[in-house]
Amino acid sequence: MSEGTKGFWAIILVCVTWGLSPIFYRQLSSVPVVEVLAHRTLWSLGFFLLLLAGQGRLRELWQAMTGPHALRAAAAALLVSSNWGLFIWAIQAGLVVQSSLGYYIFPLVTVALGLLFFGEHLGPAQWLAVAIALLAVVILTLGLGVTPWISLGLALSMGLYGVVKKSLPLGPVMSVAVEVALLTPLALAWLALQALGWLPAAWLHPLAFGGSAWVTALLVLSGLITAVPLVLFAYAARRVALITVGLMFYLNPTLQFLCAVLLFGEPFTRWHMIAFAMIWTALAIYSGAAWRQARRAAPLANG
């Protein structure tokens, strides 16, 4: 199997894992979101520590955590943590349709943020795609009478995370390891306060970890489900064209959407249908333009 083929199947595995993750987190509906988030952080760190120890890079991790880029890494950590938390909350609240819409909108939000923060040029097709996506959100808001805050929050937090990551001179595995390491003190502090009963009454729940073998195992696995796909994503990104990675990413929200409608029985109104059709059209326009741009750039690079 060629390196390109390995990378292709790696990105497929990543997107399938992320796309079907609502099924996994649905099993943790009885566990408070922040506790799930804390364990997801802790067990992810354990995985990355083992990985980096095997590569002899633990000193590099410490240097990255204490170096000049630590503040930006901390900002990235807070953004990705808020994204994780909102995603888990949406699953527990039965709003996976909204979460899937958020990850469909995310690539188009990234285009808009690239224009805002980096002065990137948008072609006519990209402007059209962003305009259609914006109109879809407006139509969904007016039709349902409620702004899809979850979708917008997921797309914007992930887009801003990408903006911060763009300026971090760290490899993909190391940067995520630094992020979860910086989040670990917060995770440990929350679990300690929860165990001691020192949280406000609205947030005070008995620790789920250790309460049952099933829930405990799922909380440990949440770290692997977080960390392993990120490593595979880094592996694939080095072996597959970025346009291919971007197109395959749409498999993630598509599987989330199918889980929401077919497995969880979430409502899918005509307003959802109109908005999703517009988003899919916008993504088709955007992806087609990106594909043509990549094809034009390839001969120039080879020449």
Image (cartoon, rainbow, N blue to C red):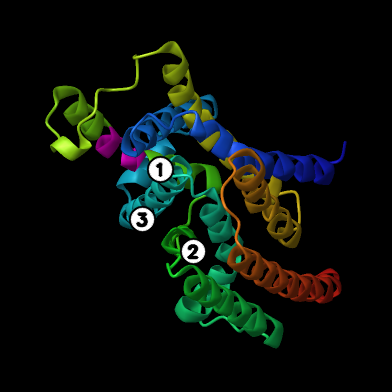
Q: Is residue 183 left or right of residue 131?
A: left
Q: Residue at x 60, y 42 (%)?
A: 18
**Mark 1 belongs to which amino acid?**
Val
- Which numbered dot is residue 178? 1
Residue 53 versus residue 22 in the image, above or below = above
Q: Are marks 3 and 2 in contact (CB under 8 Å)?
A: no
Mark toward the start of the polypeptide (2 vs 1):
2
- Which numbered dot is residue 159? 2
Q: Residue at x 44, y 29 (%)?
A: 28
For numbered disc 1, what is the local secondary structure? helix
**Percent from the top left, x then y, of residue 265?**
59, 43
Query: Disc 2 to disc 1, how far (Cα)?
Result: 19 Å
Q: Residues within 10 Å of mark 3 (few under 14, many from 20)?
A: some
**Mark 2 belongs to which amino acid?**
Gly
Q: Quadrant location of the N terminus?
A: top right
Question: Residue at label 3?
Answer: 69
Q: Is residue 162 left or right of residue 68?
A: right
Q: Nearer the viewer, mark 2 or mark 1?
A: 2
**Percent from the top left, x then y, of residue 26?**
50, 34
**Residue 66 visible to an observer of this rendering:** yes
Q: Is residue 153 left or right of residue 186?
A: right
For numbered disc 2, what is the local secondary structure? helix
**Mark 3 belongs to which amino acid?**
His
